[in-house]
């Protein structure tokens, strides 16, 4: 399954070649560019216990905080062509 992070508004797609869970007390998500130009996603195993169930990630800007969770889910559904 191909996975990528789309930077909407910047017209960039970061191809994920690896997703790695780490055990740490601190919740975190980190992107790391690899020598081949693809990206590795490193995340806390407690935060994302089953990566296969992750459908998408959405970053909400401060000025958009009036959005509800339902609004964000609807936006995500409209972006079906982007995979993460």
Image: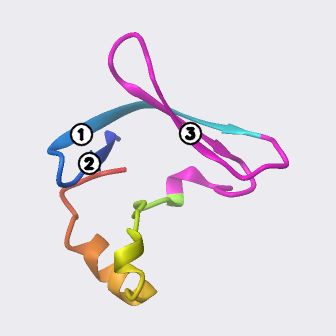
Residue 63 occupies quadrant? bottom left
Residue 80 in the magenta stretch? The answer is no
The residue carrying mark 2 is: 7
The residue carrying mark 1 is: 13
First along the sequence among labels 1 and 3? 1
Q: Residue at x 42, y 81 (%)?
A: 65
Q: Residues under labels 3 and 2: Cα distance?
A: 15 Å
Q: Position of residue 1 (x, y in %)?
A: 35, 41
**Residue lying furthest top in this view?**
35
First along the sequence among labels 3 and 2? 2
Question: Relative to the observer, which residue lies in front, 31 or 55?
Answer: 31
Horizontal placement of 2 versus 69: left or right?
left
Count all numbered tags in the image, as a single digit. 3
Residue 20 occupies quadrant? top right
The residue carrying mark 3 is: 30
Question: Relative to the observer, which residue lies in front, 10 or 78?
Answer: 10
Q: Position of residue 34 (x, y in %)?
A: 44, 17
Q: Does the residue at mark 1 contact the one at mark 3 (Cβ under 8 Å)?
A: no
Which element is circle 1 on?
strand
Horizontal placement of 36 versus 21: left or right?
left
Q: Does the residue at mark 2 contact the one at mark 1 (Cβ under 8 Å)?
A: yes
Residue 62 occupies quadrant? bottom left
Which element is circle 2 on?
strand
Which element is circle 3 on?
strand
Mark 2 burial class by Cα count in 10 Å: few <14, some 14-19, many 20+:
few
Q: Position of residue 23 (x, y in %)?
A: 80, 41
Q: Residues under labels 2 and 1: Cα distance?
A: 6 Å
Q: Is residue 8 above or below residue 34?
A: below
Q: Which residues are magenta?
A: 23-52
Q: Residue at x 40, y 10 (%)?
A: 35
């Amino acid at each position: 399954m191909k996975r990528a992070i789309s930077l909407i508004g910047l017209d960039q797609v970061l191809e994920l070649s690896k997703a790695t869970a780490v055990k740490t007390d601190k919740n975190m998500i980190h992107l790391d560019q690899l020598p081949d130009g693809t990206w590795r996603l490193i995340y806390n195993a407690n935060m994302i216990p089953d990566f296969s169930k992750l459908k998408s990630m959405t970053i909400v800007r401060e000025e958009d905080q009036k959005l509800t969770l339902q609004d964000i889910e609807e936006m995500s559904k409209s972006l079906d062509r982007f995979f993460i």
